[in-house]
Image: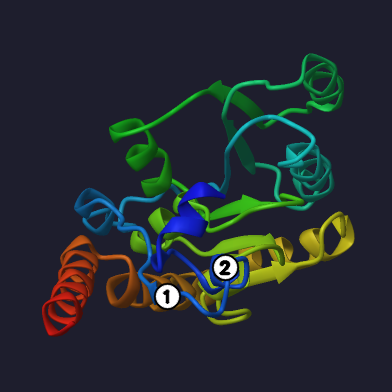
Amino acid sequence: LYVHKHFQSFVCISDYTRRVLDERKQLFSISNPVRSIFFQISQNGAPSSPVLLFVGGLSPLKRPMDLLLVHRELRSRFPTLETVFCGVPEDDGYFQQMQQQKTEGARFVGHVQGNELVDWLSRSTALVLPSSQENLPIVIAEAMAAGVPVVASRVGGVPEMIEHERTGFLCDVGDIEDLVRRLEYLLSNPILRVEMGKMARQKALNTYHPDLVAYQTTNVYRTMLSEGNSE
């Protein structure tokens, strides 16, 4: 509140955050950058067996249980499917329920970052985030940079990132049937996955590349300095 009251200009990472701020303020939209290493990921070496990836806290807010139930449903149709959960438990009771629902092919690998996350994305068929609340998840931008389609909940700033049915799929929170339907369609169509991945990477290049973000940020400072000097 102090910052909002005493500053007249703000850089917003999404339209979702812009709506929170006073329209009388001067607002600039600049996305968070994605490290260059994610743009260098090649999907050529991706395994033939499908891998669904979840990255985030294992908590009710992120709803990884939804993906665990989806995995159970899809496993009967895709016997080699792996679903990998990257994150640490944030609610012991919730994680215990997840362990009880865990079936063959589902893996909990703990917290991952840096090169380990790069490795998982290079092996993934899709990133899945069924969260009930998000702002602008950097992992979605990282997956897009890597050319990995994303299936995620239609919450917060996520619809700004994912072009539905072009770079990924958007689902309503808690709609397990729709998650199953979208992922089954994606898993069954390798050509679609490749095309979605290419479009996702292109959008990432046009939005999240660090050189672009640095250029946009520099321009904001130049604008502010110019306006200050003219007063």
Query: Quick check: 27 left or right of 110?
Result: left
Residue located beneath label 2 in the image = 21
The C terminus, quarter of image: bottom left
Query: Looking at the image, can residue 39 be seen?
Result: yes
Q: Quadrant of residue 104?
A: top right
Which color scheme did the rendering employ for the protein?
A: rainbow
Residue depicted at x 76% and y 20%: 91
Q: Quadrant of residue 199?
A: bottom left
Seen as rendered, the residue at the extreme bottom is: 230
Residue located beneath label 1 in the image = 27
The answer to whether the residues at label 2 and label 1 have Cβ atoms under 8 Å apart is yes
Mark 2 residue crowding within 10 angstroms, few (<14) / some (14–19) / many (20+): some
Type of residue at label 1?
Leu
Query: Looking at the image, can residue 185 be seen?
Result: no
Residue depicted at x 25% and y 65%: 209
List x then y, in percent, for residue 127: 55, 53
List x then y, in percent, for residue 55: 55, 40
Query: Quick check: 119 left or right of 94?
Result: left
Q: 167 or 230, which lies in front? A: 230
